[in-house]
Amino acid sequence: MSASGYSKTVPAVFAYNRRRDKTIASNSTTMKIPTQNLRRSPRLSPVIPIALATCTLLIWGGRAARADEPTPPPEATLSHMRNAAVPAGTADTTLVATPGPGEMQPAGDPHAPVRFDFGTIDAFTAGAIEHVFTLRNAGTAPISVERVQASCGCTSAVLQGAADAKTETAAHLPRTLAPGETVTVRAALNPRALSPGTQHKTVWIYTTGNAAPAVTLELNGVLPPVVRYSTDNLDFGHVHAGQPAEKTVNVSVDERLLQRRGEALTLVCSATDARVSPLDAGWEPSTDPTLAGWKTRKFKITLPAETPIGFLTGTLSLLSPPATTATAPTAPVPGSESLIPLEAEVIGTINASPAVLAFGIMPAGSKATRTIVLTGPTAAALTGATIMSSLPACVTTRFAPPTAGGSETGILYVTVAPGTMTGLIQADLNVAFKNGERLRLPVTAYVPASEAAASAKQK
């Protein structure tokens, strides 16, 4: 468990095989790529994360800033450049925040961030959390408020007096303040968009002619968890192919969540190979003295003997089964979607290299073939392999097994012919061997829609 006593929502990401890896250096990043397999995103189909990573590197190549670590937006925008001319000798035009009830600011520093602590949020009763900050022109000449910007999508801020908060402040900015004049900023926080834990949200106020924020406003508080797991990460470690593996997880929930979503609330896993089953009759009151008003239940997670060789990743989360009768929809409870990652490495006698086949960007109407080398303990272990493609209309295969008395390697030829398909193409190659071992090999490609349109016009 984490120090705060709950499992924070952490989407599973790529990981590498620490025991058998290769290092590939790019212009800005060094990535370790396993020769056996990559872990795949648990929330999507097995090959989506590989394809998304490939497409992101090829097309965008950037990094998304985390919403819970607010960073001021880029300094030099066209808007700032247009208003950058400030007359020489202009008098002091300082915009400052005037701390009000419940607000905190370091003494003696009028430019320090002004913080408001909204305390603990009740996930079941809290609506939008709002607070009004006051700004004042402390200078001797007019100053214009040009822009108000929040650090993430769960936070909004508008100048007081805006007709419609949905339009933010565009219709009212820039707004000029005379010396000594005050204006208020109404900041709102949507609890339903938050993850459990400590909250730190920021609002920046920009004035004309200044690239850096003139005023920083902060909203702080805590959203307690409504779901707790007995572990932060369900790691099976090494699992031998053909042998099942089991682990258990205790799940505790706020009783009000069961009242909201029903006693049928159960644990599910995004990894299709994993099996989840309850070990008790239902939710029972928790015996933990720190969890008064909570209920708990134990679940068993099983990796069956037929789980494919390679890395397996997924997430465990709570899900309400479909209602058998029509019921009114219930409002989501902040924090009830918390999840924990599941991971395992299934080890067998047969290996694939590469274990993930990425074709990258392909022109519309093109066709490409690449190979995967399969290695077994003997040449006989690879003979008689059966291969099935999850997308046979686009991804086809041909297998050249090792010759009798030859090496222990066979060549799998994989051909991708998108035809009229555009966008992200993803498929799984499921390879079964006579000894009972199985491999699942993801194949990805990307066909830009613009190229498909241009190809159609040429025809």
Image (cartoon, rainbow, N blue to C red):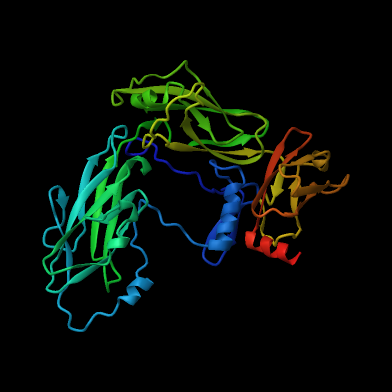
Residue 32 image point, x, y percent: 57, 55
Q: Nearer the viewer, residue 250 or 58?
A: 58
Measured as percent of width and height from the top left, residue 129 is found at 26, 43
Location of the C terminus by quadrant is bottom right
For residue 327, what is the image quadrant? top left
Q: Is residue 433 above or below residue 257?
A: below
Q: Is residue 450 visible?
A: yes
Tell me the quarter of the picture where residue 222 sits. Answer: top left
> Visible in this render: residue 76?
no
For the point 82% across and 43% down, the residue is 379
Pick the front one: 398 or 165 = 165
Residue at (41, 19) in percent of width and height: 283
Instruction: Name the foreground residue: 80 vs 279.
Output: 80
- 249 lies left or right of 335: right
- So how many labels did they put on this image? 0
Residue furthest to the top: 281
Residue sitting at x 42%, y 41%: 9
The image shows residue 372 at horizontal and vertical percentages of 74, 51
Q: Residue 279 at what x, y percent from top left? A: 50, 19
Q: Which quarter of the figure is the N terminus placed in? A: top left
**Viewer-nearest residue: 290 or 404:** 290
Describe residue 307's horizontal placement relative to residue 157 as left or right.
right
Q: Quadrant of residue 351?
A: top right
